[in-house]
Image (cartoon, grey):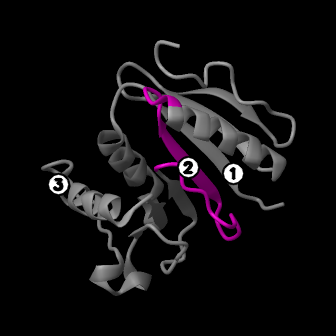
Amino acid sequence: MTGCRMDFYHLRTLPLEEALPRLLLKATQGGRRAVVRAGSLERVEALDGLLWTFDPASWLPHGAARDGQAARQPIWLTCDEDVPNGACFLFLLDGVWPRTFEGFERSLVLFDGRDDDAVARARSQWREARDLGLALHYWQQTPTGGWEEKAHSPGKQASPPKDFTPEGS
């Protein structure tokens, strides 16, 4: 068992491209570091461009394998298991799942509530995280793009929340 807290973020209003930068801004406050693990190199490259341009008044310093100086990057974008920047936050996109949660304080699964397959994967991941004994938290996006915690559990006793369902189901 690990001390990692597992948060599931159910995207219902804003797409990943709008929600992820906001969560990363909050996660990296005070010098904290994050790894964003995506399902493909193409997604990593798209996120790389997004984090430079998501808000004209702001940007998120980050890097990926082609940028080098991995240990200096506050946010590391990858589609592999690497964690070269000493991150305490692990963001999981596209249904990816790590071999281990060791070394992370918090892991965040972001999934699209309008995609039946993504919801099914997230439910399966919830059960797997529960079986690992991780503390679980389920956040649902509000109509304004904020987050409301709908469920939490200290570990092995939680089933996926009932409203962990796709839109319109």
How far is disc 1 from disc 3 in space, using C-alphas? 30 Å
Q: Image check: 87 left or right of 153? A: left
- Residue under label 2, please give it: 108
What residue does disc 3 label?
A: 53
Q: Earlier in the sequence, mark 2 or mark 3?
A: 3
Q: Based on the displayed image, in which of its 4 quarters is residue 71 positioned?
A: bottom left
Mark pair 2, 3: CA separation: 22 Å
Which residue is outermost to the left?
A: 56
Indicate left or right for 22 with 127 as reference: left
Horizontal and vertical percent position of residue 85: 48, 78
Q: Secondary structure at mark 2?
A: strand
Instruction: Judge from the rendering whether residue 86 lies leftward or rightward of residue 17; answer left or right.
Output: right
Query: In the rendered image, which quarter contains the N terminus?
Result: bottom right
Q: Which residues are magenta?
A: 94-116
How far, Cα to Cα, is label 2 from label 1? 8 Å
Callout 1: helix, strand or loop? strand
Percent from the top left, x then y, of residue 121? 59, 40
Q: Position of residue 124 (x, y in %)?
A: 68, 40
Which element type, helix, strand or loop, lies under badge 3?
helix
Figure check: 77 above or below 96: below
| Residue bearing mark 1 | 5
Q: Residue furthest right?
A: 157
Dot 2 alpha-carbon crowd within 10 angstroms: few under 14, some 14 to 19, many 20 or more? some
- Classify residue 162 by image quadrant: top right
Query: Residue flagged by tag 1: what amino acid is it?
Result: Arg
In percent of the image, x 52 and y 54: which residue is there?
92
